[in-house]
Amino acid sequence: MSSVVSPIREHLVTNGKTHHDVTEDICRHVEAKPTKEWKIAFTICLIILVYGTFWVLRTWWEGLGVWGLNKTVGWAWDITNFVWWVGIGHAGTLISAILLLFRQKWRTSVNRAAEAMTIFAVICAASFIVMHMGRPWLAYWALPFPNTFGSLWVNFNSPLVWDVFAISTYFSVSCLFWYIGMVPDLATIRDRATGIRKTIYGILSLGWTGGAKTWARYEDVSLILSGLSTPLVLSVHTIVSFDFATSVIPGWHTTIFPPYFVAGAIFSGFAMVQNLMLITRVVYKLEDYITLEHISLMNKIITLTGSIVGIAYITEFFIAAYSGVEYEKYAFLNRATGPLWWSYAAMMTCNVLSPQVFWSAKLRKNIVLSFVIAVIVNIGMWFERFVIIVTSLHRDYLPSSWTYFTPRMGDIGDYVFSFGLFGTLFLLFSKFLPVINMAEVKAVLKSSSERKPGDKH
Amino acid sequence: MAGKRYLVGIFGDEDIVLGAAESVRKKDVKIQEVYCPYPVHGLDHALGYDRPRMGVPAFFFGLTGTSLAFLLTFWTMGWDWPMNVGGKNFIPFPTNIPIVFELTVLLAAFGMSFTFFLTEGLGPTAKPVIFDERSTDDKFAMAIDLSKNKISDEEITQILKEAGAEEVNVKEV
């Protein structure tokens, strides 16, 4: 019996894979001993993590003086890194939730890794908040609890408190969504495993059997979680942008920030997913599941969101000129032509110009180029946050206090820490958990898979 | 220990199992459950299940979140320790919206998901009955509780085979 296969859309799974092939191809990496490449990569990430941890501990031991902050620039790499990581973290939920609502079947091969990336990126982002606290053992002060000195509560008018709620909600709901999506696949691994592995994956799979009633409710849960996560993901970066937009600093006090930040978050997140996907695809030989079509579709979204942030940059400039406010006008002129002009130029080139190469269908399917552009995009998005934060601060209202920002080893070491953490967590995930959502790929196999000639299924 | 006896029909294709669920039920055979490696749309309908209504717990947990968040922000900022922040109202409704929204989503998502775990008996200590281990790989297992059916084993086996089952096994649980 065959079902309808679209003659127009490209296949999402190539080479006539059967349902059993999907199980084999994905479970193999979980069941096999770690490969030599994995061990090497893991060792490198651990070394980076240990080096970074040294700097984080030094930041706490000596204080924020190990950073290059000065009396004028009180926020620099820490918050740049925070916003950058949170932004990257948006792609996972976007792929799993928004693309589910839009019924985009191509998300099935990508969503698991993207959601894992989301969770690890949010952990990295949160680590910068904790680092910036200086006294991390008092981190709980950000939560609303009645303290022992009287019932003084947190200020719910503050965007920083909103941030605490937004990021922690986003992290919890992302973990939940990711885990629920993984339960059926963990059951698949459980049913193939023996011994201690069967016990461990048995506990992790929560006793999943895949009854038709459970699946129906599961799909309902997934749909509603998507519906909840979609406004959630948009709210998180909106609230992150409020950290700036609700202040009265020229260059920050703009109403365009929420949509512009959200577009930028999707942009950088998709670029990071693209990078991870391209590596996973080669290392795990998943070319039949993450096809050139997937890469091409990702590149289309990168180009779209890159162009949206491009328009936002130009709009900001126009509005600053149009407002007639001296301070606003100067802030933006200083961004583009001041002493930090090079960061503005890097942002414009990487974010607005570089993704435009993907207007060519041939280049969209070029793997090396896709990888390079995705790296460039993330460099550009880091510079975007740097530009917004540092160039708006370093020349303030009083010319005698104008300064320049130069990072010190503390800034660099703490940033390196986040890469070590991210890499270590992602490698652990790719070894012990299924990197592709098997159940969802199997569900689209019949309608979207390439048939071999004479194949009957 | 002799427990319940089940007949397990193994199917290899989603469309066949979908048709089989309808045809087997038409012949007055009561199906315990069909275990699938991935969701098959329409199967719950074919088995006569009600439409899933996970939106109901989601809504009420969400509503709880909204109310608790309003209570928290209004009570702390307006009553317990009123704070003068830039001359704003003590109960600044618009600036509480982010908190209210986040807590609504948080409670709705977790409340609904834990309701789902509870109704489906899912949990780290759950001891599932697995009728066929291939049902999480590429086969569909239709379990039929023999104690709940008056038709003889042979007849049910025949019905399952006719509906397209690749094999029919007996399983005692």
Image (cartoon, rainbow, N blue to C red):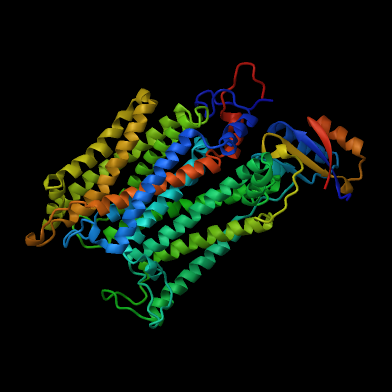
Q: Quadrant of residue B133?
A: top right
User: Which residue sits furthest bottom?
Assistant: A150
The percent position of residue A193, horizontal first and vertical second, equals 66, 41
Looking at the rendered image, the quarter that the N terminus of chain A falls into is top right
Residue at 20% x, 54% y: name it.
A251
Left or right, B126 with respect to A24, comes to right
Query: Looking at this view, is A385 or A257 the one in front?
Result: A385
Taking the image as shown, residue B126 lies to the left or right of residue A247, namely right
| Horizontal relation, residue A71 to residue B137: left or right | left
Residue A1 drawn above or below residue A160? above
Marker count (numbered): 0
Instruction: Looking at the picture, tell me which residue is in the foreground, A296 or A69.
Output: A69
Mark yes or no: residue B68 visible. yes
Residue A220, position as x, y percentages in the image: 60, 49
Picture quarter with the C terminus of chain A: top right
Which residue is drawn at the image coordinates 63% and 54% (left, top)?
B53
- A281 versus B97 height, above or below: above
Q: Name the residue at 42% across, 31% down.
A: A295
Q: Position of residue A237 (x, y in %)?
A: 36, 53
Percent of width and height locating residue A286: 51, 30
The residue sitting at the left extreme is: A400
Task: Please say whether residue A88 is visible from this viewpoint.
Answer: no
Q: Hey, which quadrant is residue A243 in on the image?
A: bottom left
